[in-house]
Image (cartoon, helix red, strand yellow):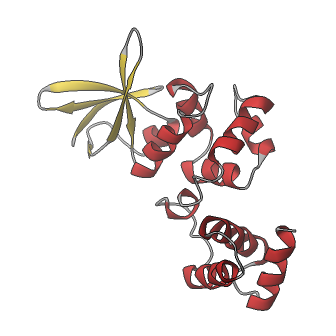
Amino acid sequence: MGECTSIQEGYLVLQTGGIGWHLCASKNTLAQVKEGQLISVNVHLAVSDNALTLFGFFTEEERELFRRLIRVSGIGPTSAVGLLSSMPPEDLARAIVHEDLKALTQVKGVGKKTAERLLVELRDHLSHLTTRAPGNQPGPAASEDSELADVLKGLGFSPRSAGVTALKTLEELGADTPLETLLRHALQQKI
């Protein structure tokens, strides 16, 4: 925890214990802090051949998504911050989980091959980030999501696949749709 003493494009300075820490940050993080504000920042240290670079994130979810992104071949820390600056972390995770190639290729510096690599390497690892990020619109009602997901698991879906399919179905049809209709739609998606 420290005081944000400066905000510039692409970074902020966090003063703590008499030291000013230069933290590279996404536009999303920078938009949530103000100069002079006492803040707690989630930090990631990136080590390269010629530098040690600190990256700061306002939420743990954003840092977790950053760490997932930099594991993808061809995505470095700077590219990952660019992706996180292009849309809120929850929307980026949702684009990957729902394999929205169009949304990803609209990000500056992300071509079709890179977007496809993101989808292949991350789509099974981000579904938990599409519903828990604070400050975003709430997703479908949790009880209905788990009821549909439980039925899908009972039919042989993996827990992850059941959760993603249930979430996608509820987003498309709405939480007030009868369970039988939701189930029919979910099963048709998997055929």
| Depth check, front residue: 101 or 29 | 101
| Depth check, front residue: 127 or 154 | 154
Q: Is residue 77 left or right of residue 23?
A: right
**Image height check: is 185 above or below 19?**
below
Q: Quadrant of the C terminus?
A: bottom right
**Image height check: is 27 above or below 176?**
above
Q: Position of residue 90 (x, y in %)?
A: 57, 54
Residue at the image position 62 percent from the left and 79 percent from the top:
145
Residue at the image position 77 percent from the left and 49 percent from the top:
100
Extreme-left residue of the structure: 17
Q: Is residue 178 visible?
A: no
Q: Quadrant of the N terminus?
A: top left
Q: Is residue 145 visible?
A: yes
| Depth check, front residue: 13 or 100 | 100
**Image height check: is 87 above or below 71?**
below
Q: Position of residue 189 (x, y in %)?
A: 84, 69
Quadrant of the rendered image containing residue 37: top left
Q: Is residue 37 left or right of residue 95?
A: left
Residue at the image position 63 percent from the left and 70 percent from the top:
163
**Image height check: is 92 above or below 10?**
below
